[in-house]
Amino acid sequence: MALNAASHNITGEKTGPISGQPPPLADDVESAILEAANGDVKGHNVPGQDGGDQNAEKKVKSEKEMARERAKADKQAKFDAKQAKSKALAVASQPKQKENKKPQQEKLPPYKEETPKGEKKILKPLDDEYHKAYVPAVVESAWYDWWEKEGFHHPDFTKDGEVKKPGSFVISIPPPNVTGALHIGHALATSLQDAMIRWNRMKGLTVLYVPGCDHAGISTQSVVENMLWNRQGKTRHDLGREEFVNTVWKWKDEYHSKINVVLKRLGGSMDWSREGFTMSDTLSAAVRLTFTQLHDEGLIYRANKLVNWCTKLTTALSNIEVDQKELAGSTKIDVPGYDKKIEFGSIWNFKYPIDGTDEFIEVATTRPETMLGDTGVAVHPSDERYKHLLGKKVKHPFVDRLLPIFGDETVEKDFGTGAVKITPAHDFNDYRRGKEHNLEFINILNDDGTMNSNAGPFEGEKRFDVRYTVISKLQEKGLYVGKKDNPMSIPLCSKSKDVIEPIMKPQWWMHMKPLAEPAIAVVKSGEIKIKPASAEAMYLRWMENIDDWCLSRQLWWGHQVPAYYVKIKDGPEYDAEADHWICAEDEAEARTKAEKSFPGKEFELERDPDCLDTWFSSGLWPFSTLGWPKETHDFEKLYPTQMLETGWDIIFFWVARMIVFGLKMTGKVPFKEVYCHSLVRDSEGRKMSKSLGNVIDPVDIMDGITLQALTEKLKTGNLAPKEVERATKWQQTAFKDGIDECGADALRFSLINYTTGGGDISFDVKVMRSYRNFCNKIYQATKFVLGALPEDYTPPARDGTTGKESLPERWILHKLNFAAKRINDALAAREFSQATQAAHHYWLYELCDVYIENSKSIIRDGTAEESSSARNTLYTALDGGLRLMHPFMPFLTEELWQRLPRREGDKTKSIVIAAYPEYELQLDDEESNRAYELVLGCSKGLRSLLQEYSIKDDGQAYVQSLNPEAHAIASAESGSIKTLAGKGLSNVTVLEPKASVPAGLAVYPVSADAAVFLALQGDVQPDAEIKRIKPRMAKAADAVREQEKLIRALGEKVSREVREKEEVGLKDLLTEQRLYEESLARFEEMKLK
């Protein structure tokens, strides 16, 4: 039972993924192979036939001739196999007329869990149909509900409400947007975060994993508005603000619950009783208090400035919500709301007539439609071409407007015509010049991107339709000069992909530079550590060049700005005076403030209808989810949090703002560490995108999905037909057989193993399948151990050593101890991939492939005391291994750990709260490790020789120990060497260090301590063996020279440990070289006899 259920590998060999019979060949492919076999009788032959002329007279050949012919035939066979394969593949690539498929093995019906919800899982026998092998759906059922009901995920305080002695560890989940399904990036983040949470919980800390969702203002409102229009033909204005917001709340509740279900499926051990939502009462109170306080301190202010305007969403955006699309030249791109593509990446030249003269001045623009908002022309004051025009005006050809020509030293004389049209209300550069030269600011756009009355005859037309109309009208007036390519970038809304328009809008802004300075200082001082270093550099670069933050969003879904305009009777109009704005946490407070500011005045309060940027509330997340602004127990004991794990792509959006708000509002950093995971790309290295069809739903990996179902999911989205076609083609290549059911544990383990702290992750679903097989290996190993333990077995009260353990037992306990050290150290250093690799190595290559195999013979053939000791060690190695693996694979480890008998006095309910294995000095047994590594080296060498010489049985092996210590080990463990070497050996003889080696043996150098030999069967050919040995001997000699060179190059500062390690390596290589030389001499001597 300890072996992989389908591998049946040689005992002791490393076990790979489960494999079964290969799929049956199609008839046409099989025919091609048989035809190739018939075509050359010396190659692969037709079944039932032998090669050669069967009627020819047979000739008796010498052994040498036969050996030469065998070698020649082997070479030809390999060539013919390649040819046959090529031909078969060629046939397979042709359209198939008819394919007879054998019926697949009938699948089991879906598993029905009998455990009542929230109760401890009813464990079924391991020999029933659903438990013979690892089935993710069976293993993962019922456990999460029980964990939740038992409160294992709540923070564990002492009886007096204090944090436990080891400390606290808190992670607030980066709240996913409530707008839809989770993707593989969310699965990566959850896997990493939960691994850290579970690890720290098992180490005895007071642990809290805070769940929650973000209201995602723009995205959610956009989705619901589209849904309203598609289903009812209504807009939000048809419903009114109150009813629309209620509609969004209902929609939010539905999708919010779907997100939580997936997070639970992934095994995220969040405390759902503390779930946050950015529009909950607690977080809304935090938002109002923060905004009001910062306004009263002068850090938030009202100003009419240029903003990034999205005409599709009709809202302002901050700079980091705008993507820049680079264009090399003239390019036509799709713009929302237009049937035809719009040209960008060109520069158009036209002329303005000089008022009162017959002269013209030529200007250029990349946005011809904006000329309707021009209010000036700038030239360099020293430009001789235009000196005589300074102070004059040009006449606008389409609206009744005169534009002054003025000097500006920032104009580049040699760029273009040297004359620049100025549109202060629609260009960020022109905005500055307009302010400096007191130009008129004329807005020509409505919020929806159509022209307003300031555009004259173009009023009501769409902005990019006007682009072409303006050019046409300029041509008619003889003012158009021409166009040419112009490399440039265009700003796009990151949400709608609409082209951003700079527009003047009165908005709320936050002064960022005074807030950024302390946020920079805490990172530079190390009070907050950001990993990797590239993410820290990105953070500092952005914070040191930060602009003021535009807070206003023209939305209904979100936190309405807590600002009220005081409309005094017979006073200025709404929003005409900045000092008439009052900010307060509610209207009553606003009225009180207004009465103090405008005593004796009759007034009305009108609240700003806009909402705040979603990231404003998200910036308060780490402390508002713990109860702030109230002095709650959680906030008092668990803030600051310890760690933020997130993607590097939201450092600006979120991380920076949390640090700013945390320092300003609480006086403390919000967290002590930021770990930024990599971007997940598909198997071809492309960024995952809905339009490419390569966005992977983690549920599809956990549950499995057919290719047809994947394709159908594409059709239910918002992709254009061409995008669906392209995405379908990619899916047919990447998932031609669909996606197998892999389960949460394999998905988590794979994602964590991908996390090296380096570049982006190239995600391949095939990797999931391989780790699903690894889960089965753990499952089958546990089944074997349970089968090896007596029914009334009770493990020892403690998991230490008795001093009577055999060498294999001492070795596996040392390896368990070493694995605990490696994993703990790796997780502490956030080297996630190293942690999973250490766990994988222990389970696969040490526990399963070695100790479990070795324990079989001890339990079977040993004395009662030896068998008992082997079982106890087997239990300890398995129990420790499951606990080591739990942070990465919570479901599988709980399922198996619950089946193990408990040590006397151990009342631990769940592996979730079991103690995590720690390194123990008394279990560090390097002497036993070296000894058993010698045993493993010998068995590995013998397996290699058995395979090389195709010896299946009656193998005669020798172990030559090269020093007394090695001889003692080999003599004592010869049985283990034989067992681990495989069934092909019938005898292992251990030779004294100075004993002569019999002739006719093949050698395998193990180390400077030992070598193994295998007696060759049949008629030994010295020439053939000499031919084998010479290249190996030459390779060993080269390795010796390289190692000597490396040692000579070691500097004086190299540690003694490093130098000793390299010298041991040289000693091993010199021994290898000598052993090959001696073996060569023995075969040379055989030739002479």
Image: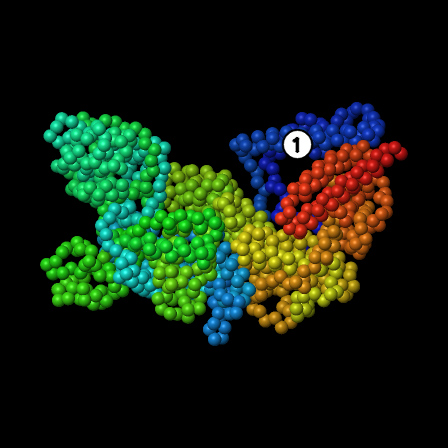
Residue farthest toward the top in the current orientation of the protein: 56
The reply to whether residue 974 is in sight is: no
Q: Is residue 767 or residue 1082 the one in the foreground?
A: 1082
Residue at horizontal 41 percent and vertical 67 percent from the top: 635
Residue at (72, 67) in percent of width and height: 802
Q: Residue at x 82, y 30 (%)?
A: 64
Q: Is residue 755 placed above or below 666 in the rendered structure?
A: above
Mark 1, residue position = 81
Instruction: Bin the neighbour count of mark 1 within 10 Å (Cα to Cα): few under 14, some 14-19, many 20 and up.
Output: some
Q: Which residue is the extreme one toward the right?
A: 1089
Does residue 902 appear to the left or right of 581 in the view shown? right
Q: Position of residue 408 (x, y in %)?
A: 23, 37
Amino acid residing under circle 1: Ala
- Residue at far bottom of view: 160
239 and 264: which one is in front?
264
User: How many badges with numbers are in the image?
Assistant: 1
Give x and y (percent) for residue 550: 29, 51
Secondary element type, mark 1: helix
One can see residue 770 in this view: yes
Quadrant where the image shows the C terminus: top right
Front one among 523 and 28: 523
Q: Position of residue 152 (x, y in %)?
A: 50, 67
Instruction: Pick the quarter of the image with the N terminus.
Output: bottom right
Q: Is residue 716 left or right of residue 350?
A: right
Q: Which one is nearer the viewer's eye here, 510 or 129?
A: 510
Colour style of the rendered protein structure: rainbow
Q: Quadrant of residue 383?
A: top left
Residue at 48%, 50% in the rendered image? 532
How far across and how far down the image is residue 80, in percent? Answer: 67, 29
